[in-house]
Image (tube, coloured by chain):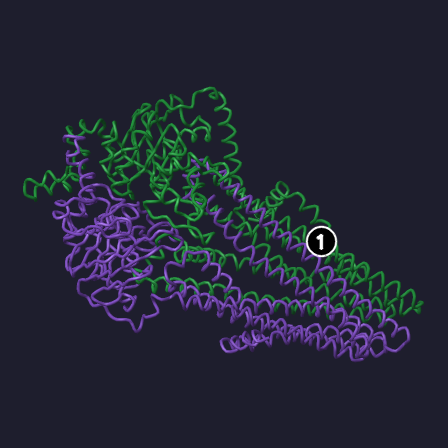
Amino acid sequence: MNKVMRLLKTAWKSERKLCLIIIGQNLFESLIPMADIMGIGVVVDALVTGQGRKRVFTVIISYILIHAGISLTRNLFTWLKDIEARKSTNAVQYRYARQSLEVDYPYIRTGGFLTLKRKSMNIMPAFCIGRFGVCLSYILKLCGVLWIFTVIGPLLILYVTALSVPIVFMAFCRKKAEYQYRQDIAAEERKSDYLYKVMTEYAYAKDIRIYGGEKLISDKYIKNAADQVKKRDILGRNNARTQSIADLCGFLQLLGMLIVFSYMVYRKDISIAEYTVLLSSSSLFSKTIACLFESLAEIKEMCAYTDILDEYDAFIADNSKVYSSEKSGKDCGREPASIDFEHVSFRYPGRKEAALEDVSFHISSGEKVSFVGLNGAGKTTIINLLLRLYEPDTGTIKVNGMDIRELSASNYYEYIGIVLQDFYIFAYSVTENLCFDKEIDETRQKTVLAQAGLAERIAGLPRGLQTSLYKNLDAEGVELSEGEGQKLAMARALCKETGLLILDEPTSSLDPLAEYELFSRMRLISEYKTAIMVSHRLSSTRYSDRILVFDGGRLIQSGSHEELMRSEGMYRELYSTQAKYYTGEGGLYEA
Amino acid sequence: MKHKRMSTVSGAFRLLGRYQPSYYVCMIPLILVSSAIPLVGVWMPRMIIEYLTTEREYGDVLLMISLYIVVLSAANVVKNILTHQADLCVTRFKTRLQLEIGKIAMYAEMREIESAAYKEEILVAGNVTGLTDIMRILQSLISSIVTILGLAYIIVRMNILFFLLVGVTLGIKVVLSVIRYRCDAERRLEEAANNRVGAYLDQLQYYAEGAAKEVRVNNARGWLSGKIGAFRDRMVELQMKSFHQYRLFETLQSVAVAIQNVCILLVLAGYFMTGRLSIADFTMYFSAITLLSSRLSEITDQMLGFSQKLLSCRDFNKVFCMREKTDGAEGKEDERGALKETEEIAVLKIKFENVSFSYPGTSVKVLENVSFELQRGDRAMLVGYNGSGKTTVIKLLCRFYEPDSGKIYVNDTDISTIPRERYYSMIAAVFQDFSVFSFPVGENVSMRASEETETARLWECLKKTELDTLVENLGHRENTPITRLFSETGVEFSGGERQRLGIARAVYKDAGIFVLDEPTASLDIRMEEELYRNFYHMTEGRISLTVSHRLSQASVSNKIFVLDHGAICESGTHEELMSRDGIYAAMFKKQREAYGSRRIENPAGEKKEFR
């Protein structure tokens, strides 16, 4: 009950206008059957009491007019309701989308968050108010019918009410089963969506064909579908059973009423006009009582969702840490960044082994640093932590002497230019991909495109910087190759005036010539910036002042190329391994 | 257009007949029962009133009442059971349909999958719910129509004029609906376009790899929420239009119905007063009319919903036509393939003969007159700048596309004549953009269900790709699902781990042709070295073809082909190509310079460091 009050209170507070409209709508909605019932009573009465033709016709016409008036008013309210409800729902959905953009990165792609979000979206204010409104209309109808029933006396009302108990109970059972079903089926539905995506999308098509994965995937789908059908079957059986029991009780009510009413007519206690009124009221009564309790059950179900709503709010509040200090956060300045990692350890969720273990290092302002190491050594993890996509388990990360947790996130991101390992190019214009919603003049955009080696390609596009990329949203969009996409990501990183440039495998999709050109421009593009580069191509280290070598989540070596080559260790081993292919030192080729 | 709509319905029914014939067994009685219940509700009370007004015994009245209740109860119980069965059929049908579409997509030719038309079609086909909704709406539509006909019969029996009257209102309704439908058509197109935007935005927020990161680290949250806001505003704007229209028509219709009711009631009252109608009949007609008008207003909504759904499903059949096409192709291939059944599977030779190719719908020749030959044991490498056609060669070899001219032979057999499954059993490929599935690790490697995966072989492959220690340390070892999409115990693989997984998959397959597209792009040095070291072993007795920007690959290749603007401009061994001093030599020197220049910069004597 508390929850109901809470729901009502929040609904009333946030959507007062909608509440009033829905009250109006349901008031008139409940008047319609009353008008029908009274209408037939009055008309029959006028007929059987042998009143004049004129009188009968007046009664009929006024009945229809009243009825039409009520319907039209109801229509008007419904119209207003549709508009208001739509607006309200839209606002809520928009809020959800914005919140998802603030949730900390580790959570956004997890099933847990997505399910929670989907579930909590089941209970939008407009929807709640709508349900309360429907409930209200049933209550009003019921009141009307009971008022008519006062003619017949309390015993019948008692009988009818008693038989309503099982109906109510069944309605509750049904709603509970449906709620449970929706909870249970969510996982299967998500799975079948995913499998369908795998079956139909281009991205998976090649591997499925070459490796004959058709059977694996369709078998998985079939198994999942069987689970879905099984759960649906259980629900359906349950529904058919409870519905039938409720129907039978409803008809027993009707039976009782019919017997009593007919007996009263037989005894000439009531007129035939009254009889018709009672008859229609009784069928309205049994229909309404079932609907009322169904709607009460729905409200109860809604209450169950309030917990989910709380859970969602709590989740959002707890896990939007990155953006929580947005206003109070410190400014990181515009100088080339100095970076300190102090005893940082980190483990990815779901992994046993640590990704980073007690990593400490210092990068001075304006320094160009390369991260070197094998796969899984922790290079990208450091970048992820530095970008605040994940939070270290222990230790602190400082930029310009300030703990990055104390910085204002958007200010901080404005300060960093990044090429991600899994960079993403959006299906919007080139300009939007470079600057998003920031105003950056075209000359600068063209300069950075040139620096990334993409100027010619973009200049050759039909609408230049305004050309849409890919065909997702614009049929005239231009497809970019992986390599061109990576170049565009590079231009994006350079477009902002930043103090820190982070490049994670920036040349993985480039051909040797493009890679060479990019590396030779490295010094120029990272001027007045601190730069961090992760690359498997050790040739890139020649553009760095210092190299940090990682292995198994630990920092094992640090120094300039020359220093590291002079001492025994991983760097020298790796460098020689790679260089031998090209320099002939490995004895493979004499070029 | 009309014809098309009908064909959607008949197509849906055909599919239903094919996959869920039992639906019809439920549907027909269900329609009969659910349309009969309201008719009983109109007719039985009349009988009761008649018994009451004609001074019958109270026992007769009781009998009538009991009969009424029994009939109603039985009908409702039957209806409930049938509804459940029909619903179950629809659920089965829905999943089955999705599966069939998925299969169509999986067995369709790659070039079809890659076409823009396919993306549209599959989007339409993905709307399976739309099709099942059509079935559901149709079901209630038919029962409403049957009820209406029943009511119309009752009313018309009284007076043929009523028939005209009801006909006129119905006509007005139909006309209004048609007008509304027409007005709606354009809006719906706009809505569909807007919904595509919505789907893409959703993708960006939650599903697209990398997008969520980019949005955060580039401070593009404002930008993206602006896009989302614009999409939502547009959606509301479009819906508002339809609300206004809808209510206007609704109002016009209720006015028409009110006029109809006045007329009918007046006539009925007149009849009663002239003694041509008993009071029992009068009440029956009255409730029949009320029911009729409420049914009529329901039916317009149903019809509207129905035609909207139809519109959204109109291309559904196209996808199934595609199916018939692929079916046919498969059949033909089987015949041709049967002739070669006795042939050895071992791949001895691959030959490209004057292969030219341009992507469908474009005029640019991606490949021109490409010819080369590879023998068993060859380790070939394809080199070239971005966009020179390397990946296309692989796509053609994988038979994703067919050459415009020229032929590709495996063991002197034109590959287009080999049945698909048979051909693919000969080939293992690691693509640049290979996919990792949200399935267990083991299944990702074997591409077979866990039970069918050979564990020993699996671990051997994991070992070869140095994934073994990683997988051993996972909670459920090889049965640990990748990604946390379905299980909280799932594991996320890094770029390099994913790439090794891709290679492990190819090794597990143990096929005659081994294709690698940029296999070392996200591998580290040691892993790359390891791959090269294992390369001989992995490709022993096979033909391998590698596309790579890393010319270090040349150390394990005995044939190098250089592609430039779609043509092979150089070929030979590393030494031959270096001495030719062409594109290959230029590229190699560039990469060497990156390493070599150190020696120039640094004092002499550091050379020994490379040992």
Q: Colour of chain B?
A: green
Question: How far across and down, in percent of the image, does residue B133 sit?
Answer: 59, 53
Q: Which residue is mark 1?
A: B81
Split into 4 quadrants, where in the image is the N terminus of chain A?
Answer: bottom right
Q: Dividing the picture into quarters, in which one does residue B506 lie?
A: top left
Question: How far across and down, in percent of the image, does residue A516 sit?
Answer: 18, 44
Between B300 and B389, the residue placed more toward the observer is B389
Asked if residue A302 lies left or right of residue A43, the reply is: left
Indicate the secondary structure of the residue bearing disc 1.
helix
Question: How far across and down, in percent of the image, does residue A205 sit?
Answer: 43, 41
Which amino acid is tagged 1?
A: Ile
Residue at coordinates 42% horizontally, 38% vertically from top-left?
Answer: B110
Asked if residue A335 lies left or right of residue B92, the reply is: left
Number of numbered markers: 1
Question: How far across and down, in percent of the image, does residue A515 sit?
Answer: 21, 45
Split into 4 quadrants, where in the image is the C terminus of chain A?
Answer: top left
Residue at coordinates 25% horizontally, 39% vertically from top-left?
Answer: B549
Asked if residue B86 lies left or right of residue A347, the reply is: right
Answer whether residue A281 is visible to the viewer in this image. Answer: no
Q: Residue furthest left?
A: B603
Q: Dividing the picture into quarters, in which one does residue A39 lie?
A: bottom right
Answer whether residue A265 is visible to the viewer in this image. Answer: yes
Q: Colour of chain A?
A: purple
Between A330 and B276, the residue placed more toward the observer is A330
Asked if residue A60 lies left or right of residue A472, the reply is: right
Between B141 and B257, the residue placed more toward the observer is B141
> With respect to residue A538, does B560 lie above or below?
above
Label 1 resides on the chain identified as: B
* Label 1, residues with CA under 10 Å away: few <14, some 14-19, many ≥20: many
